[in-house]
Structure formats: structure tokens, C-alpha cells
Amino acid sequence: MPYEPVLLARVGTPNPASVEAYRADGGYAVFERVLAEVKPLEVVTRVKDSGLRGRGGAGFPTGLKWTFLPKDHPGPIYMCINADESEPCTYNNRILMEKDPHQVLEGIMLSCFAVKSECAYFYLRYEYGDAYRTLLAAVNECYAAGLLGKNIRNSGFNLDIVLHRGAGAYICGEETGLIESLEGKRAWPRIKPPFPAIEGAFRKPTIVNNVETMACVTQIMRHGIDWFKSFGIAPDPKNPRDAGSYGPKLYTIAGHVNEPRCVELPMGVTIRDLVEKHGGGVWKGRKAKAINPGGLSMGFADVNAPLKGEDGKTEYDIPLDFNGPGKIGCLGLGTAAITVIDDQTSMVDVLHNVCQFFSHESCGQCTPCREGTGWMLKITDRLRRGQGRREDLDILIDVSDRMGIMPGTTICGLADGAGWPVKTAIRKFRAEFEAAIKDGTRSRHAKSLDLVGAH
Ligand SMILES: Cc1cc2nc3c(=O)[nH]c(=O)nc-3n(C[C@H](O)[C@H](O)[C@H](O)COP(=O)(O)O)c2cc1C
Ligand code: SF4
């Protein structure tokens, strides 16, 4: 049976962003019922039991994160909604905010009620002008309808939602960078611990959650735990740390495909199905060569590399759940935004482009990240200008292996994300890089001395 979308169910309906239309579709009924009948802790337990894992990139269990808040804190406790969405080719949050803002707002209301927060900061990527205007109108409608403000529906619960436009940098999406930026400072991530749940915005306990995570909270409270767990992939019995990958998921498809789009599917769809069935196949009749499985920072899948122990299958066939990309050496599911690279595109050019992005976006606090991303850009730049050296590939792998939270040399995960595309590209497409060095071919995209973004 074809999957029936839930998160995107209202996209394309008449006036989906208006509060009346949302209410006519059953919207806010759950929030009103929860206010009247349910205790905050029951909402926390329900979200925890659903197995919901954050949709912002790291996949941390949402209900569990909420339990890290100090017990019986006198307040204030803050909620920050992360709508910075700057990972290249990722736009699932934007679709939700522009097309069904009340579904997201209801999730925020339920989550704030659960964690006893009376103030949610909605941190929105600056470039998302349409989403900002749509959300602003939706928030104002909620105040007018008595769904926000003081003593909502005579429950004694107060809630304000404050829209805050971002500062136009990728690092503003890292949760403590976001908090610094919200406080009016440069978005320099903080050293953790303390984690935001203990000391976050304005030094108060704070929960940071992604937009899609909020939409999932609405659906869990509406349809229940069993419904949510009926989709996706159960925990791997061989991996005691795996919390499973449950529920519906938004995937975005971009790059060299015929129909770039955002689709909702149960967690665990394969890359092949996303490209071939949902993205209309690779463009211009070509074949796929490499895929980013969840944003640039997750690294590359090699479409033609066979999967060990799985006859006839390749990395094109890995399932996109929280575990799948890790099985082929990628960092993880990330934002579930796939970027398709066709077989006529040079991986040297692709990698140079990726390095430009991370070098430009590194905030510069940690030496391995600031210098590492800069050097990776310089090396990939000379590779594409046909001036690569034999030792360059090993240097690139060495640099990328040494920077990041995982090796323990940086404050935040941007450095891990900068390293993963480099090491996966070189390990999986080494022959192409070696040929570029040997032949000394200059990329047709290389201009002279264009070290854009180098520090
Ligand atoms: C460099 C960097 C950028 C990030 N950008 C985003 C982002 O744009 N949106 C987001 O939700 N999470 C982003 N994250 C992850 C957040 O730090 C945090 O884990 C997430 O917002 C938590 O929400 P969730 O538990 O609902 O996924 C980023 C992390 C890093 C290291
Ligand atoms: S890892 Fe990079 S982006 Fe993150 S804090 Fe350090 S320098 Fe800044």
C-alpha cells in the first residue's frame, strides 16, 4: 500500500497556513485536550516512548533530552526551535514552515507544555523571508485565537513564541552557536558540558529542537505511540546503543535529478528508491556516481561500490535510517537531504566546492578546524588546477581524520562534517583523484588563483 503522508498531508490544500483551515482539519484539538486533561510529565513520557529521535542531524532521542532539564527548576526554562537549516541542499524545514506552520507551532506548544517552558525562541535562517512572514502571521493568529499568551484556555499555562531571524551563517545552526547568536553575540559554539539543558540561553536551562522534530511531536500526540512506531526500523539487536529509527521522515532530493523535491516516507527508504522513484531519476539520461546521503557533511556514497555480503547490491541500496549511512562509512543520516552527483561530474571539482563551503563557514575558534578547512581548500584548489602532488591525498585524509569532536580536537561538529566528505571522497574515488594528479589536467571550472574562502 502506498504511504499516506502525514507531515505533508496539508501541503496543497486551500490556504494551509491559516489558523481556521488548520482548525477545520482538526488542528489544535490535541493541544487543547492536553491542556485540559494531561500532566506535562505524561507528554514527556509519551514522546520518550514513541522513540522519536531529533530530526536536526544528530538523531538524539527527543524525550530523553527533555528529561535532562533540572527537576523542579523555578524557571525560566527556554525552548529554542532550530530553523537555521543551512546544510546545503536541505529544505525540509522550509517546506513545513511555509506550507503548514500551525503543525509546527502546535508541536512547540505541546513541547513547551511538557518541559514547562513559557517562552520559545524560533530561530529562523535569515534567508528564509517567506517562511518568516508566514510564521509571523501564524503566530499572530494564535495570539488572537487565545492559543498563545497568558493563561491559555484557562489552564494556567502561559506561552510566548518569539521569532528571531538568524545571522546568515551555517554555524548558527549548531545549538550553542544558535544560543550565542540569540543572545546577540557572534555565533561561537560553547564548550560542552554544560549542555544547554543545564545552562543554555541566557544561562537558563534550554531545550533546542529542530522544526521537523516539533511537527513529529504534534503527530505523536495526535495519533499515538503505536502509530509512530509502526513506521521505520526497529533497533539493531547487534547494536545495544541503537535506539531505532521510527516514524515518518521528510527527505529532500537535490542535485542532478530530474525532479528535485521534498518527500515524506517512512524512515528507511533506500537512496536508490529516492532517486529513481521519487526524484524522477538522474538527469539528462546519465547515471549517478556519488550521493551525499544527508547533507554535505555526511560524506559520500559510491553508487557503484558493492555492499559487503549483499549480493548484487551497492551503496545505492543502503536504507536512509539513523544507522544506514554509517554502514558505508558516512557520518550518519544528517538532515536526510540527498544530493545526487552524476557520472560526468568531476569529484575533484565537487570536493573543492565542498571545501570552499566549510572553510568559509568555520567560525575559527579551534585551530584544527580553522586551519584544517583552510588547508583542505588550498590542496583541493591545486588539485583542480592540475598542480596536485602525489602526497596530497594522504595529507587530506590525515588532516580530515584529526579534526572534529570525534578525535576530540574541536568544540563542535562542524569540523567532523568538514572532514567526512574529504575522507569518503578520497577513499571511495581515489583513482579519479590520482588520475587528476598524474595527468595534471586542469578542471574546466578552475579559474586562475581563485582561492575563495581561504583564511
Ligand atoms: C555545524 C552544525 C550545524 C547545525 N545546523 C543545524 C540546523 O541548521 N538545524 C538543526 O536543527 N540542527 C542543526 N545542527 C544540530 C544542532 O546542534 C542540534 O543537535 C539540533 O538542533 C537538535 O535538535 P533535534 O534534537 O530536534 O534534532 C547543527 C549542528 C552542527 C554541528
Ligand atoms: S569546530 Fe570549527 S566551527 Fe566549531 S567551534 Fe571549532 S572552529 Fe568553530
Image (tube, rainbow, N blue to C red):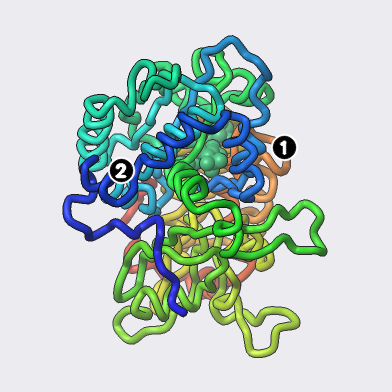
**Disc 1 designates what residue?**
408
Nearer-the-camera pick, 104 or 151: 151
| Residue at the extreme front | 37
Drawn side of residue 208 relative to residue 134, left or right: right
Q: Position of residue 393 (x, y in %)?
A: 61, 61
Please, what secondary structure does the residue beneath circle 2 have? helix
User: Is 16 above or below relative to 37?
Assistant: below
Q: Which quadrant of the view contains residue 424?
A: bottom right
233 or 126, nearer to the observer: 233
Residue 164 seen in the current view: no
Q: Amino acid at mark 1?
A: Gly
Give how far across and how far down residue 364 sits, in percent: 51, 30
**SS at badge 1:** loop
The reply to whether the residue tagged 1 has its Cβ within 8 angstroms of ligand 2 is no
Q: Residue extending furthest top?
A: 74
Disc sitting over residue 101 in the figure:
2
